[in-house]
Amino acid sequence: MATQTTVAQIGTYEGQAVILRGWLYNKRSSGKIQFLQVRDGTGVIQCVAVRNEVGEDVFARCSELTQEASVIVEGVVRADARAPIGYEVQLTDIQLVGESVDYPITLKEHGVDFLMDHRHLWIRTPRQRAILKVRAEVERAMQAFLDGDGFTRVDPPVLTPSSAEGTTELFHIKYFDEDAYLTQSGQMYMEAAAMALGKVYSMGPTFRAERSKTRRHLIEFWMIEPEMAYYTHDDNLALQERFVSSVVEHVLNHCEAELATIGRDVSKLQHVTAPFPRMSYDEAIAWLQKRGHDIQWGDDFGAPHETELAGQFDRPVFIERYPTAIKAFYMQPDPERPEVVLCADLLAPEGYGEIIGGSQRIHDFHLMEERFAQHHLPEAAYQWYLELRKWGSVPHSGFGIGLERTVAWICGLEHVREANPFPRTLYRLYP
Amino acid sequence: MATQTTVAQIGTYEGQAVILRGWLYNKRSSGKIQFLQVRDGTGVIQCVAVRNEVGEDVFARCSELTQEASVIVEGVVRADARAPIGYEVQLTDIQLVGESVDYPITLKEHGVDFLMDHRHLWIRTPRQRAILKVRAEVERAMQAFLDGDGFTRVDPPVLTPSSAEGTTELFHIKYFDEDAYLTQSGQMYMEAAAMALGKVYSMGPTFRAERSKTRRHLIEFWMIEPEMAYYTHDDNLALQERFVSSVVEHVLNHCEAELATIGRDVSKLQHVTAPFPRMSYDEAIAWLQKRGHDIQWGDDFGAPHETELAGQFDRPVFIERYPTAIKAFYMQPDPERPEVVLCADLLAPEGYGEIIGGSQRIHDFHLMEERFAQHHLPEAAYQWYLELRKWGSVPHSGFGIGLERTVAWICGLEHVREANPFPRTLYRLYP
């Protein structure tokens, strides 16, 4: 009797009869033989139907199949060195489960708007499936690293009365009789959690109501935010480079087939090992000025600046100690130079820009109180955050890494939208 | 030189000098000896300061410490059979990092409202820390089971133009010029993903704008939603019982200390092995009627009904095949009895009620079109969901498990709010 299995596990059934349940991805015929490309979510395999062997009835059923018809295939697994996965199936029987007439996504080229309108179907194509698979492996790698490093996962709330970074880019919501906002970052909650659990991380959706339409922005995107009690700025950077290089290594080891499907030049990822180069903000400004950029000390970097700065290196680069004036209120000033803060952005190579923003946080109660006043923060909503500095405050640091940007870089995508299963962009809320 | 380590790893340093960085949880003194309970997020350890050994200065510093002061302790690790973790630290030096004057949460009893107002500090207490640790281990166990079973993680959007279950309990949001809602369930998106990736699961926040205030409800809660192509109702239940029992087993094996801190009677969890008992809805109604409940066929169960039904068993029980009229529009009717659907709720024992809702989904295009009409669903917003039935539709099933309810049951909590780090309830959005 045939064993039900998946494409991913087909190698363990060589010479045996199997049943696969999937969809017809593509088909070609040479008259007496039909070659069916069948996908089942775990991979694609060629199923070969030979007229003389399967009989007229089964052969006719194969002939009638159209793209994306769902099928249950029975056949015998054969090793085949020419096949991308090393095996093919000698088909013996096939059953149509669900028909597929005029499937809208053909194997031709389609425009991006059309594909995004059909995102629920587009994710079935091998390239999109491979990207989602890499995304899942990146998440797994991040969690495995952090769990193995003594971190505890903590899930901060999405609904918040306030935010760490101003209210202009926040989505407002009526929470019964109160006003609430969708979180831009779980950081403040993670700081509280770090005081309870030592080293913590979150992994969840965050939101920015930005009217920007670039290849690096999504309205809803996932962040992983580790926060560590008793960590200094330097501890923070050392952790980040170990973390990012372990994630890249994991993907190289676990997603060979997916990266090949995507067409990623993996040689670009093989350099991504710790330590990462570091430039101070001062050095970065001077370097850009020398290359003819019209940028002054105190300015923030734009995407072209980031691309050029990162372009010097074959792995991500830290830019550290930005001016206090252009960074978030909670960042710890450099004790020797209070006009800069103990922060760093990590810029990915190949033009992918900032994937991590992190800093040491202010742990002194009075300095934080000053910042509250300077930034006109509503004390009532933030009272609890201030209180973290009142009882047993410790130096602590943390960072946030953008999941879609990281996946876009690792996969070599043109736009972050392909790194999210159902991306939300400025004018897209469907499907 | 002393090695910096954590309470969790203290056992590997027996007889050696170590440095611990943490907070003073509690203290008692016998004149010449002080016993400091120091917590560092990974556990609590007793540090013993003997006046004659540490000298006046260090001893005086110990005397001055108050609850939740942050401290760096140096000392030598000693095995001690009386200690809950098997070790204590013979203190040699201590340094105050951050003071703590009049810490609001004392070791006395406090009211729940007070504790919830101070949730950012309350999570530092051993019991709350233990619950959060169990929550993290439940998440890890769920992911490990699903990853190991061939599932791919997919993150559905929080911002949606519509919802699977009506709009009355939805939070509305202005998405630039459009209307959007916070997701109640990622299920519809997971169905699309299952057609692309075979077996998928999500793990993320969901929202219900319900004006209910019970010990089982949160406004924002986490759900894990697996969805499987080619799975029937029976496949679905078999998966669920393997899944839940493996999660419970993982927690029993990995959280012994935490469950002891919480005071959980773990003997109640040791029976939780597959298979789980099953009752049909019909049987459940008849059983309740026989016990004198005023309930008719067609009624939904209330919390007291669920508690009584589940009270018959020492492990969770499936109640299956509810009336079509009281369940969601997308559920597959029983082919032999279309007045009931191929669904099941999983009720936890000990009064914890429903932790899982699941069903086989309608895969026939025309039947789904009929349901759209019957339920007055806006076709434009749901078009993509209907289209999943148009091209290569297959029988498929899935379920959603509530994280906080599962953690509340496993930990034996009185209220789900303790199972979430920063719970959102009807009148609580702070901290």
Image: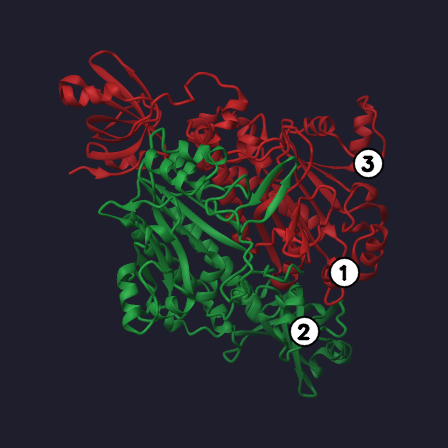
Chain colours: A red, B green
Q: What is the three-letter code of the residue carrying label 2?
A: Ile
Say which of B184 and B67 sits in front: B184
Viewport quadrant of the C terminus of chain B = bottom right
Which chain contains the residue that carries disc 1?
A: A
Please tell me whether mark 3 sits on a helix, a strand or a loop: helix
Q: What is the three-letter code of the residue carrying label 1?
A: Ala
Picture coordinates of residue A124 (x, y %)? 41, 30
Q: Which mark is residue A380?
A: 1
Viewport quadrant of the N terminus of chain B = bottom right
Q: Which residue is mark 3?
A: A282
Instruction: Work out whether A80 lies above or below A327.
Output: above
Instruction: Work out whether B331 lies above or below B344.
Output: above
Kindly report the distance in space between the C-alpha atoms of the residues bearing marks 3 and 2.
45 Å
Q: Is residue A207 left or right of residue B383?
A: right
Q: Same chain, marks 1 and 3?
A: yes
Q: Which residue is mark 2?
A: B105
Q: Same chain, marks 2 and 1?
A: no
Instruction: Work out whether A91 lies above or below B409.
Output: above
Kindly report the distance in space between the C-alpha atoms of the residues bearing marks 1 and 3.
37 Å
Query: Do labels 2 and 1 touch, CB within 8 Å?
Result: no
Decide: few, some or many residues near mark 2? Use Cα within 10 Å; few <14, some 14-19, many ≥20: some
Say which of B115 and A239 sits in front: B115
Query: Do labels 3 and 2 touch, CB within 8 Å?
Result: no
Say which of B188 and A238 sits in front: B188
Instruction: Work out whether B93 lies above or below B242.
Output: below
